[in-house]
Image (cartoon, rainbow, N blue to C red):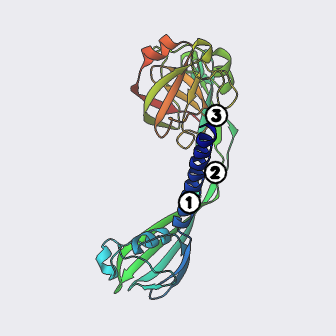
Amino acid sequence: MGGSAGAERGTASGLLVLAAAVAILLLIGSARAPAHYFVQLKNRLYHHASTASTVGELLDELGIQVDDPELLGIPLSEALTPGETIYLPLEEERVEQVLTVPPPVVYQTRPVEKPNGEAPRVIDPGRPGKLRRLVRLYRLDGKVVGKHLKRTWISRPKPARVELPVSPLEHIPSVEEILRDRLPPSRRLPPPKYFRKKLTMEATAYYNSESGGINKWTATGLEVGYGIVAVDPKVIPLGTRVYVEGYGYAVAADTGGLIKGKIVDVAMLTREEAISWGRRQVTVWIID
């Protein structure tokens, strides 16, 4: 019985391995390899390698957009045949500009007893940036029926830094001061007068692993606690100073798998504090 059972298990195991191998081969075979296509306009020929399966997907990749797709004379849902040429009754006009973008201003404050007697001081004048702006206009019988805009940085602007003398209550702490003081959340602390922009965000809370939380250290190597917020770096870059309504000043120094888009996760010390904070909508002042 033991030998027969072992043989049956071996056969079953072999069948499972074979089934897995077949599934992998089918998956690899189903992956669409890039094919070459041509899109012929009246005055321009595009040659493009793509995994697109329809005319609409291919035109989206090329950035060929019109207000009324029926003007193209071909359904966007039409399936593509590798190597085919798609003819469109459009004429393309390109308008390119190089724009000078002034540097954004980042303010830092210096608390003084009588701020009205002192002038702001420019610490770093910054540097303008260069932005290439390419507009593609699509014409049919001379009339513009669509356009596509693409912006590309040639060189990004370097922020200017200006120091403002303010009263102690209006002082905006530096990153070093925020991380040194680690002040607990406060609703009494007024928001900053000087900031780059404001965002409306959804705010959640997490806490240090020493109190039962998930992590003790942030993604940037700082200890989880007051003065730290987790963000989506695509929305708020790491290292940015922020002021969170109902929480206070903090540094964007952590990330999280669920922190995507306009969500900010404020750090607490205890589970009770995190539960008390809950989930709420807040205004976030971006200082840097």
Q: Which mark is residue 239?
A: 3
**Position of the N terminus by quadrant:** top right
- Looking at the rendered structure, the kind of residue marked 2 is Pro
Q: Residue at x 29, y 77 (%)?
A: 70
What distance separates the C-alpha of mark 2 from that of mark 3? 18 Å
Q: Are marks 1 and 2 in contact (CB under 8 Å)?
A: no
Residue indicated by mark 1:
22
- Looking at the rendered structure, the kind of residue marked 1 is Val
Residue indicated by mark 2:
157
Q: Quadrant of residue 208?
A: top right
What distance separates the C-alpha of mark 1 from that of mark 2? 54 Å
Q: Are marks 3 and 1 in contact (CB under 8 Å)?
A: no
Q: Is residue 165 shown left or right of residue 72? A: right
Question: What secondary structure is found at the residue carrying circle 2?
Answer: loop
Query: How far across and how far down the image is residue 141, in percent?
Result: 34, 87
Instruction: Compare marks 1 and 2 and give the one earlier in the sequence.
Output: 1
Instruction: Compare marks 2 and 3 and give the one earlier in the sequence.
Output: 2
Q: Note whether 31 is above or below 164 in the view shown.
A: below
Query: How far across and how far down the image is residue 230, in percent?
Result: 56, 30
What distance separates the C-alpha of mark 3 from that of mark 1? 48 Å
Who is closer to the viewer here, 118 or 19? 19
